[in-house]
Image (cartoon, helix red, strand yellow):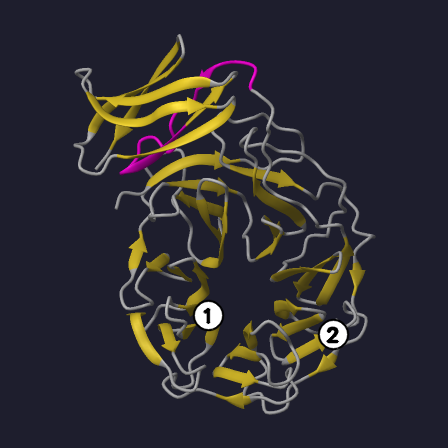
Amino acid sequence: MKIKIGKTLKQNCSNGTNNLIPIILLSIILCGQSYAQWEKTNLPVTVKVNTIVIRDSSIFAGTNGDGIFVSTNNGENWKSINEGLQSKFIHTILITGKTLPAGQARIFAGTETGVSVSTDNGENWRSINSGLSGLGVWSLGVSADTLGDTTIFAGAWSGVYSSTDWGENWKVTGLSTTAMPVHSIIIYKNFIFAASLSDGTFISQDNGLTWINIIIKNVDPFLPEMSAPIYSITAFAGPYFNYLIAGSIGGIYYMDYLPSSFEGDIALAKWDRPVLCFANRNDTLFTVQYGYFFKLFYRFITGLTHESLNIPFFGYKAVYSLALNNGYIFAGTDNGIWRLSYPVAITGVESSQEAPAGFELEQNYPNPFNPTTVVTYLLPVASNVKLIVYDVLGRPVATMVNERQTAGRHLAKFDAGGLPSGVYFYRLQAGSLVRTKKMILLQ
């Protein structure tokens, strides 16, 4: 698998220019020099908050030495729920089940000495460490295969562990060393992603049996390689590509790939401060970098864009966790949890049903590619369309489209599996209109 460096995201607090390639939109949502609108919740100011998890109307806060707190009124009041908890250093919280009433959900807490579980909304906890040997657990994730079997994954100081009996017993997966702290785990579609503080990011497509290390090699001398450690990873789906996004000491990095395979470009957003956490809402990804908040989402038309929104500056403080609920943004810091009233009902994906003003064939993306790419084109009127790929000798090697299509923007996926590496051309004909572009295949 070949992995390549792609485009760069740039940070500023002004309106930016459009990029011709429609990828992820980075929008600054926090510019200004006042955070008077941020409210301190009633969690003690002496508490450092490592993780915030929200389920229904309950907000769970895992802290760095003070255990777990829960609030059911948006942070106005908090209750300590530490009965039976094996350690009060809480790195991560995972909630399974659709509802919170006792007996209908399991709450897992990754602690400094293993995993604890509660089945009564956090009122009582018990240790479930068989096979973990008291390891610190920094991340937790859950997956279900096609047969409905559930697996819990735990990222620990020595790799990734898994349990198929709701944490009662743990075993080592194929990703295990004596010195690889796995700080973040996500399960997305049929992929398991694990990000470590020392050795980069890994992928498993067989439920943790084997793993592939994503080695990011910088082919552009002006762009640095991804910086370790990687603190947090997340993923969301655009209309045509999926995105794996990593927050590291050097900023944000992302990889886009087609739903059928883990392939595509690596792109870099090189900022000057670490990105420690993410929060999702309505296909929109929120993150924060020392007081400045950002949202990232896919915009179909404009591609890479910057725009400023009126949200107050938070102050130069580290934010270790983010969550969104009931019209609030919650930020976990060294001195408790702060909140901001903010309407976060953002759709995230934008498109246009209007007919394009002209006939256009866009550059395939990604390019170079291996072995799949997507071609986008615009039809001002309904047309009989042919989209054909040719080799350098002008011989047709594949027909991507051969049908009548309506006016609008269209996409066609090209799978070059079986073709040799090299330069190819794709030719679009719609009625009497013809356009041709070059693409590069790297097998």
Write down the residue under mark 2: 71
**Chief secondary structure of the magenta span?**
loop
**Residue 25 on image: x %, y %:** 56, 37
As drawn, 363 above or below 209 = above
Question: Gap in Å between the C-alphas at discs 2 and 1?
Answer: 24 Å
Residue 133 shows up from this direction: yes
Picture quadrant of residue 223: top left
At label 1, the amino acid type is Val
Picture quadrant of residue 91: bottom right
Picture quadrant of residue 210: bottom left
- Residue at 37 percent across and 24 percent down: it is 403
At label 2, the amino acid type is Ser
What range is drawn magenta here?
A: 356-375
Residue 177 shows up from this direction: no
Q: Is residue 427 left or right of residue 270?
A: left
Residue 374 belongs to magenta span: yes
Write down the residue under mark 1: 142
Between discs 2 and 1, the one toward the N terminus:
2
* Nearest the eye: 66 or 19: 19
